[in-house]
Image (tube, rainbow, N blue to C red):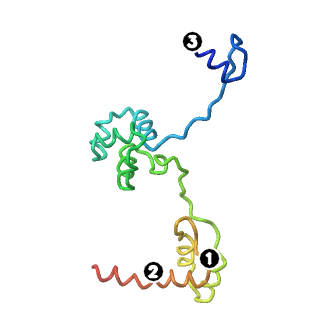
C-alpha cells in the first residue's frame, strides 16, 4: 500500500506522505467482446449456452470475449450472437440504433417526383433510401434509383 501511495504522490505531484488525491482516469471504450461478455453475464448465460444457442463455436466466443486481438466477427456472426442474447446488433457494436428513416423529402427527389408525377407511396419509399448513411441529392440520381427498382421488378416475376 505504501508503494502505491508513493507512486500516487509522485503521479499527482503531491509531497510524499501527503494524503493521496483522487485521480480520474478515462475509461477505455468497451470492445465488442467485452459487450458480448457483459450481456451474456447479465442474462445469466454460460459461454457454453451461448455457443449452443447461437451456433457459434465456444472457442471462438471465448476468444472474442477475452482476446483483444481476436478477429472482428462478421455481420452474420454478430447477428447470431445478438439474437441468442436478446439484444440488437447495435448494442453489441456499442452504437445507437438507427430506427427511424430520415425525415423530409430532399429537393432533388421532390423535383423528380413532381416531374414524373410519382404516387405518394413511391415518394415515401424513395425518401427512406440511404446508401452508407447518405441520401441521394440530385434529381438524376433519384431517377436512376427509381428506374433500377422498377426494372428489377421483373426479376421477382421471373423467379416464380
For the N terminus, the image quarter is top right
**Residue 17 location (% of width, % of height):** 69, 10
Q: Residues within 10 Å of mark 2 (few under 14, many from 20)?
A: few
Q: Earlier in the sequence, mark 2 or mark 1?
A: 1
Q: Mark 1 points at which residue?
A: 137
Q: Do the residues labelled 1 and 3 touch (CB within 8 Å)?
A: no
Residue at the spot 61% in from the left edge and 35% down from the top edge? 26
Q: Which of 94 and 129 is in front in this view?
A: 94
Q: Height in image: 133 above or below 19?
A: below
Q: Which of marks 1 and 3 is nearer the N terminus?
A: 3
Q: Residues within 10 Å of mark 3 (few under 14, many from 20)?
A: few
**Residue 92 location (% of width, % of height):** 46, 46
Q: Name the residue under label 2.
A: 149
Q: Do the residues labelled 3 and 2 touch (CB within 8 Å)?
A: no
**Which quadrant of the view contains residue 101?**
bottom right
Q: Separation of disc 2 and disc 1 at Cα?
A: 17 Å
**Which SS class for mark 1?**
loop
Closer to the camera: disc 3 or disc 2? 3
Q: Height in image: 43 above or below 86?
A: above
**Which quadrant of the view contains residue 14?**
top right
Residue 153 relative to residue 97: left or right: left
**Residue 109 location (% of width, % of height):** 61, 79
Amino acid at each position: 500500500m505504501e508503494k502505491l501511495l508513493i507512486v500516487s504522490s509522485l503521479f499527482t505531484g503531491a509531497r510524499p506522505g501527503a494524503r493521496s488525491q483522487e485521480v480520474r482516469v478515462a475509461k477505455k471504450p468497451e470492445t465488442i467482446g467485452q459487450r458480448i461478455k457483459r450481456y451474456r453475464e447479465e442474462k445469466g448465460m454460460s459461454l457454453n449456452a451461448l455457443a449452443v444457442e447461437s451456433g457459434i463455436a465456444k472457442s471462438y466466443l471465448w476468444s472474442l470475449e477475452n482476446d483483444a486481438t481476436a478477429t472482428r466477427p462478421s455481420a452474420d456472426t454478430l447477428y447470431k450472437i445478438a439474437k441468442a442474447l436478446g439484444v440488437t446488433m447495435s448494442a453489441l457494436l456499442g452504437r445507437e440504433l438507427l430506427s427511424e428513416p430520415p425525415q423530409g423529402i430532399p429537393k432533388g427527389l421532390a423535383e423528380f417526383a413532381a416531374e414524373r408525377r410519382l404516387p405518394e407511396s413511391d415518394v415515401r419509399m424513395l425518401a427512406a433510401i440511404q446508401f452508407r448513411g447518405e441520401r441521394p441529392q440530385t434529381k438524376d440520381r433519384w431517377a436512376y434509383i427509381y428506374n433500377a427498382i422498377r426494372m428489377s421488378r421483373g426479376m421477382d416475376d421471373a423467379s416464380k
